Image (spheres, grey):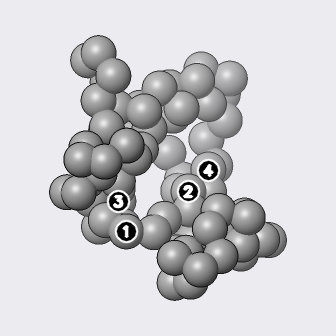
Amino acid sequence: MRPLTYHISKPLIRIGDKTILDYQMDNLTSCNIRDIIITTGSFEDKIKMHVKEMYPEIKISYVNNPKYDTTNYIYSMWLTK
């Protein structure tokens, strides 16, 4: 996804008029899910800021994987336990 991800994380890439994360959040909230865990890596602050602005009424827990470069997303999922 380079060069798109040099300055933003993949979830914040726009497809049409929304980010990838917005599509996911909209789908979850449309199913009345209001307690969500988001794993983060690089650009964690940008993700948190975006979610706070777009979904202030949703309870969000963030889990950061400091070893993402060597473990990838599987370890991130394990950290959410």
The three-letter code of the residue at mark 1 reads Ser
Q: Pointer 3: what residue?
A: 48
Q: Are marks 2 and 4 in contact (CB under 8 Å)?
A: yes
Front disc: 1 or 4:
1
Asked where in the image residue 80 lies, by quadrant, the reply is bottom right
Q: Which mark is residue 42?
A: 1
The front one of 66 and 57 is 66
How far across and how far down the image is residue 58, in percent? 50, 45
The three-letter code of the residue at mark 4 reads Ile
Neighbour class for label 4 at 10 Å: few (<14), some, many (≥20)? some
Quarter that holds the C terminus: bottom right
Q: Pointer 2: what residue?
A: 38
The front one of 28 and 46 is 46
> Could you tell me which secondary element the residue under label 3 belongs to?
helix
How far across and how far down the image is residue 32, in percent? 66, 28
> Could you tell me which secondary element the residue under label 2 belongs to?
strand
Q: CA distance from mark 3 to mark 4?
A: 13 Å
Q: Are marks 1 and 2 in contact (CB under 8 Å)?
A: no
